[in-house]
Amino acid sequence: MNPLRRYEAIMEQLLASKEVTVADLSDQLQVTGKTIREDLAKLEERGLLVRVHGGAVLAQSEQLGILSVKEPVVKHSDEKAEVAERALRYIEPKDIIALDGGSTTLEIARRLDNIPLTVITNDVYIIGELARKPDIRLVVPGGYRVRNMLTGPEAESYVRSLNVQKAFLSATGVHPEYGFSIYTGDLIAFKRALLESTCTTYVVADHHKFGQFALRTFAELKEVSRIITDSGLTESAAQPYTEAGVEVEYGDLPAD
């Protein structure tokens, strides 16, 4: 296994259990403890984890590109709710939209009215949410499951055959240099398929994710139409993105 795949496997395990041990990783990845300790040191240098005696823990409490199999993440729920309310303003009846997997896109799904709408999604939580709304036509690309998301060549190929009007994508990190990033390479092809098959693409991310980056970049800043975030983002924090030519929606939520 090459180093990049090991890094992804280590971060996947951290996201699932919040901590890892050198001994367990050595057994799972079939490499020496010395190699695992070197890997952990490199990931710590990138700010992705913190080494502790015998293993490591996440550097931040919400380094998530995918959700736990047990329950959706609710940290920063107020900010995620605000982002979702902003995103709803861009969705109109009879639209064909895509909701990428993630905690913020799940909030969008929860707030969607039962209106004539076509929604493409690979998130099993979103599927469960929208299945209760009969006027919404739910399109599921298929593929294999990576915790709460469906992915794989079949899903990617199917999405590329569609004409999507608006896509709402999640990201673990939003960074001026590294763009939009996540931890696992398993989801990059699906995200790229959405990006390249959609007329208008929005990244939905609460302000805590700005200035952060994860292991794998799936899009540059210039590739999306707009970043939708919450009122917690300051003007100075937004400036590097607007200077790069990206529209960033933040500040007070507009009145209806």
Image (cartoon, rainbow, N blue to C red):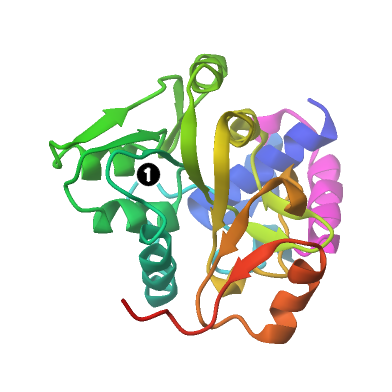
Q: Is residue 158 magenta?
A: no
The residue that appears at 80% across and 36% down in the rendered structure is: 4
Local SS, label 1: loop
Specify start and end residues of the magenta stretch as a single range. Answer: 27-48
Q: Nearer the viewer, residue 29 or 111?
A: 111
Q: Which residue is mark 1?
A: 69
Q: Nearer the viewer, residue 41 or 242?
A: 242
Left/right placement of residue 13 relative to residue 121 reads right
- Point out residue 10 in the picture as x, y percentages from the top left corner: 67, 44
Place residue 241 in its image quadrant: bottom right
The residue that appears at 69% across and 40% down in the rendered structure is: 8
- Point out residue 188 in the picture as x, y percentages from the top left corner: 65, 34
Answer yes or no: is residue 247 visible: yes
- Point out residue 145 in the picture as x, y percentages from the top left corner: 44, 28
Q: Is residue 150 above or below residue 26?
A: above
What type of secondary structure mainly makes up the magenta span?
A: helix
What amino acid is found at the position of numbered circle 1 in the picture? Val
Q: Is residue 123 above or below residue 111?
A: above
